[in-house]
Amino acid sequence: MKDRALTYLRAALDRRDAEFRPGQWECVEGVLRNERQLVVQKTGWGKSMVYFIGARLLRDQGRGPALLVSPLLSLMRNQIDAARRIGIRAETINSSNQDQWNAVKERLARNEVDVLMISPERLANDDFRANVLPQVANRLGLFVVDEAHCISDWGHDFRPDYRRIVHVLRALPPNIPVLATTATANQRVTRDVAAQLGDLRVVRGPLIRETLFLQNIQLPGQAERLAWLARHLPRFPGTGIVYTLTIRDAERVADWLRRNGIAAEAYHSEVADFEERKSRRAQLERMLLENRIKALVATVALGMGFDKPDLGFVIHFQRPASVVHYYQQVGRAGRATERAFGVLLSGEEDAEIAEYFIRTAFPPQAHVDRVLGALNEARNGLFVSMLERKINLGRGALEKTLRFLSTETPSPVAKIDGRWHATPVDYAMDHERIQRLCELRRAEQREMDEYTRTRECLMLFLARALDDPYSRPCGKCANCLGRVIVSSAFDEGRSNQAAIFVRRSFVRIAPRKRWPTGVFEVYPFRGGIGPDLTAEEGRALSLWGDAGWGRLVRDAKYGVGRFPDELVEACLQLMEVWKPEPRPAWVACIPSLTHPNLVPDFARRFAQRLGLPFAPCLRKTRPNDEQKRMLNSFQQARNLDGVFEADTRAMPQGPALLVDDMVDSRWTFTVAAAILRQAGCPAVFPLALALNSMHGE
């Protein structure tokens, strides 16, 4: 049996001299003995080989298909190729291949699928649970949970949908082998996963990466870090990954690198991944795998499971959320090379971003109360779109709250045929547990901050944080060597250019295309927003509180109460880069009854510098709630119904530049532009000082 397994290993790796790594064959044997195992091994050890070879050998014995739960589409795409090299017929059912679902179901029914790969979110899908899972569960040969630390809310990357795995596992016959794998589980997480999945045999290996050379560099300002990247990135071997904490920074860093002649692309959760965009994320992964770009600039969306053995470097533009996060990400590099580099650049914005993510990790009690209140009042349940009408919560907040509640045990909500229903459960949020978890996250942040300043072996610090019993000094990091591996120097001239670049990283404001259904009673707006009412694409000078102009916008609005001339000059620079066509002939602004002078004062000074007339022809007819308190499209648009009117006598001819201080949902700009267009304005270009947004993955 071992000889056949070795043949499969060599075929999968496409290497005739390949041998099992220490512990690999023993784990495969455990699968064949129907054991339940938790395998904790470093990235690159070959955990996927254990479950693919185990699944292949079980199929050779006439056993049923394997069900593999994987957290990211990048993992699935990356590993299906390896599976096929050993004759495994691997299929996936996920959000990016809906047109193939029926064909996959038919192949499952004909027993023509050896491994079915799904995301944990698929376990929440009604159709999957009703029509796919039963036929697989009845004849399952192997159940695999990859990145099993996600099951534990004590883990660094807990995902509520992983809780469903426990329920599925409890319904399976006890003689089905279970294999849970992870590279990032300390003792606390290991105990939690083992308790939830049952009597698991824990297999641990050494986590130290022998080929990885680590160094920390303190460069607080974004301009300094950008200049450092432009100077040093071309000198790193091969290709690699630059990690950022936010989508905005991924886009910004990739743009900066391209402007400096370095082939780079941004990778994050908002990169579309469907056929109309030719599976852009899969294309980006392929570009990196084939060395057609120097670097992917990525958020955590490119994380677990992405495998490029010869990755030459991983650089962090900002400090990750925890030491465990950092180990998991930097461990992408140097799996099959003699020398690879991991460099952590800390930023002054790191702590603020980290606290935001901790603060928004769990739904607040108020959100839970509103959702359960609305569902308890609904006899026949509610779609999410119906919940948006009833309660003032954003789509993201609603879905987060429902996902959180649906994975509680027992759950106070249930989803039936697409509608959410309240269940007869006397539910109370466990605030103590949530508080403990938030405090744990803050402790992890403090530990990560300590890592950036430690003088001991960097690899030893990481291994110890993961409770690695084999931890020891690596002898290769900058601290062990007693000297820098990569210089912290950067070009002052390029730093100045980067500072200008950051302040000119303007944000596009895409026009909305459709009115929410049933919103307006005063305005006659329905259906699609036609070309006679739509706004043009606009621009925001900055992100609210961002390293560019965003902090000055925030401080001016809530500090001195007046936007300084420096922001007027910055908007002039924006106009020089933007060059909207047809060219605006006059300037208007969004009126406010609570702050009647703030935006008009800025718009008037801006118009003077542009040499254009300022016309405050847009008026508010009545007070309304602050738009920032409206949390979804239905509530945001309804809050503006009948609020604006245009004074056609005071309105100049030609296209208008419509100014506001902040933009978030875009509905204020959308409604105001429609009113101006309805009054005869041929084109309206929105311009905001800041976009109020914080994007993570």
Image: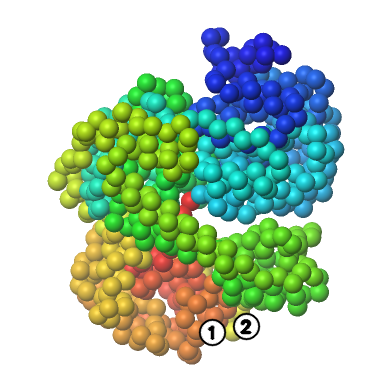
Query: Which badge, 1 or 2, comes first in the chain's sequence?
Result: 2
What is the tally of numbered marks visible in this picture?
A: 2
Q: Are marks 1 and 2 in contact (CB under 8 Å)?
A: yes
Amino acid of disc 2: Glu
At which x and y percent is residue 330? 41, 37
Q: Which residue is pictured at 45% across the width and 68% down the height? A: 664
Q: Is residue 71 above or below residue 4?
A: below
**Could you tell whether 358 is left or right of 560 in the image?**
right
Q: Nearer the viewer, residue 155 or 239?
A: 155
**Could you tell whether 110 is left or right of 335 in the image?**
right
At which x and y percent is residue 680? 45, 76
At which x and y percent is residue 217? 26, 43
Q: Nearer the viewer, residue 54 or 614?
A: 54
Q: Is residue 226 visible?
A: no
Corner quadrant of residue 427: bottom right
Q: Which residue is pictured at 22% across the width and 74% down the height? A: 564
Snapshot colouring: rainbow
Q: Is residue 142 above or below residue 524?
A: above
Residue under circle 1?
Answer: 642
Which class describes the residues within 10 Å of circle 2: few (<14), some (14-19), or many (20+)?
few
Residue under circle 2?
Answer: 521
Separation of disc 1 and disc 2 at Cα?
8 Å
Q: Is residue 542 above or below residue 238?
A: below
Which class describes the residues within 10 Å of circle 1: few (<14), some (14-19), or many (20+)?
some
Q: Is residue 304 visible?
A: yes
